[in-house]
Amino acid sequence: MASEARKLDSIKDVISSAQKESTAADKMDFYDKWAQNYDTDVAILEYRAPGLAADSVAASFTGDRGAALVLDVACGTGLAAIQMKKHGFEHFVGVDGSKGMLELAKNTGLYEDVRHCMLGDDELPVQWGSFDVVVIVGSLLLGHVPVRVTKELCKATKPGEDRFIGLLAPPSPYSFQTPPALKKRVLLEKNLTVHYNLSPLGGLVCITTRNCQDNAEYTASLKQQLKLMEEEGLWSCVNVTEVKKFQRSVSEHEEAYVSGSVCLFRVSDVAQ
């Protein structure tokens, strides 16, 4: 028990040092060095995000999992792909800023390709609208990935299609309200209202973030960005899962565990 406590304290020191690194290059150098111990260390932290993200995607993905193309952004050593493989997903492309992490991800044998990219500084090195699923797990943090990168995640995902689902001649007691994000998709012609909704053909984007005190300001900014993108009609929220024990805390100012969120969105055609 004492040995485990010492290991946990050591890991906390490691992560604390990462947060103190001031430049992107310094952070990537840190992750390059941490790569060999990363999987062991996050297991001690009871890091649940990869499994939670995989479960969320699997619960809502209605297509052929074996044929789906998945973009794993900030893939690290490949933990998210390992969990998604358990659900039947087989085709992965990984992107990360750490070459050391990418090498380990490549060694899993799960990725068809791994690509180096400094998120926020470089544009995602992918063809827009080509992925059935895009995931970013554990990297939406202060000093790591800028909030604005969420728009690139959206653009990388296959768009949905507008699907005609109803034609009403108002006034009618059976009229339904068009969701706010789709109001601009409603066409008025003469005395008829044409209602459209998003087709389930749109790809999925899964985002995780931890709700710790040190990340509070970033999380607030992220939530504002996600909401704005929904209001703009770029995607629609499928579900948000709030998790009380997301992982063990690495801060002395918090309780033993921190909470976290798993957000799943379906991309619309507007994203392209």
Image (spheres, rainbow, N blue to C red):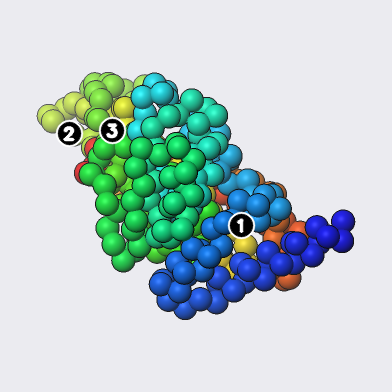
Q: Position of residue 124 (x, y in %)?
A: 29, 53
SS class, disc 3: loop
Residue ID for mark 2: 188
Which sits in the foreground, 34 or 27? 34
In three-dimensional space, the C-alpha distance between marks 2 and 1, rounded to whole angstroms, equals: 59 Å
Q: Quadrant of residue 184?
A: top left
Q: Is residue 223 left or right of residue 177?
A: right
Residue ID for mark 3: 160
- Mark 3 or mark 2: whose residue is earlier in sequence: 3
Name the amino acid, label 1: Asn
Q: Quadrant of residue 195?
A: top left
Name the amino acid, label 3: Gly
Which sits in the foreground, 232 or 189? 232
SS class, disc 2: strand
- Mark 1 or mark 3: whose residue is earlier in sequence: 1
SS class, disc 1: helix
- Mark 2 or mark 1: whose residue is earlier in sequence: 1
